[in-house]
Image (cartoon, rainbow, N blue to C red):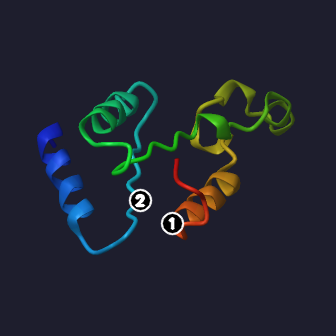
């Protein structure tokens, strides 16, 4: 998909009657997720889009060591998915103030 097509799809979502839409950008490490998100953030105003990275949701090194996953840091099973999911639910329900 081209970036312009992605922009068009996001614009259509913004123009829909849904007050808040959440879009997830997923892919392997190094796939270009951050680059795509940066282009989206550059194209749309802060009143239209908000980037919520998962970077702060890694399990701690101690937890990863205890789980035997320290060498896999960054893999899907090394994130605190429950905490990130709770944040997304709060965002979706509009329980987080907008800045």
Q: Badge 1 local density, few (<14 within 10 Å), some, or many (20+)?
A: some
Helix, strand or loop at disc 1?
Answer: helix
Residue matched to label 1: 92
Q: Is residue 92 above or below residue 49?
A: below
Q: Position of residue 67 (x, y in %)?
A: 81, 39
Nearer-the-camera pick, 6 or 74: 6
Dot 2 or dot 1, earlier in sequence: 2
Left or right: residue 75 versus residue 29 is right
Residue matched to label 2: 22
Q: Badge 2 local density, few (<14 within 10 Å), some, or many (20+)?
A: some
Left or right: residue 77 versus residue 69 is left
Residue 7's mark?
Answer: none
Nearer-the-camera pick, 64 or 68: 64
Quadrant containing the N terminus in the rendered view: top left
- Rendered residue at 69%/57% (across/down): 82
Q: Is residue 74 above or below residue 9?
A: above
Q: Position of residue 26 (x, y in %)?
A: 41, 44
Q: Is residue 40 above or below residue 48?
A: above
Nearer-the-camera pick, 53 or 67: 53
Nearer-the-camera pick, 23 or 76: 23
Q: Is residue 2 visible?
A: no
Q: Position of residue 32 (x, y in %)?
A: 34, 28
Helix, strand or loop at disc 2?
Answer: loop
Q: Position of residue 40 (x, y in %)?
A: 29, 39
- Rendered residue at 60%/31% (across/down): 74
């Amino acid at each position: 998909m081209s970036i312009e097509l992605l922009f068009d799809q996001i614009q259509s979502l913004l123009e829909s009657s849904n007050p808040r839409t959440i879009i997830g950008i997923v892919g392997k490490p190094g796939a270009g997720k951050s680059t795509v998100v940066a282009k989206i953030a550059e194209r749309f105003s802060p009143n239209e889009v908000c980037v919520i990275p998962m970077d702060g949701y890694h399990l701690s090194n101690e937890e990863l060591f205890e789980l035997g996953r320290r060498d896999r840091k960054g893999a899907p099973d090394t994130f605190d998915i429950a905490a990130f999911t709770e944040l997304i639910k709060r965002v979706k329900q509009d329980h987080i103030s907008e800045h």
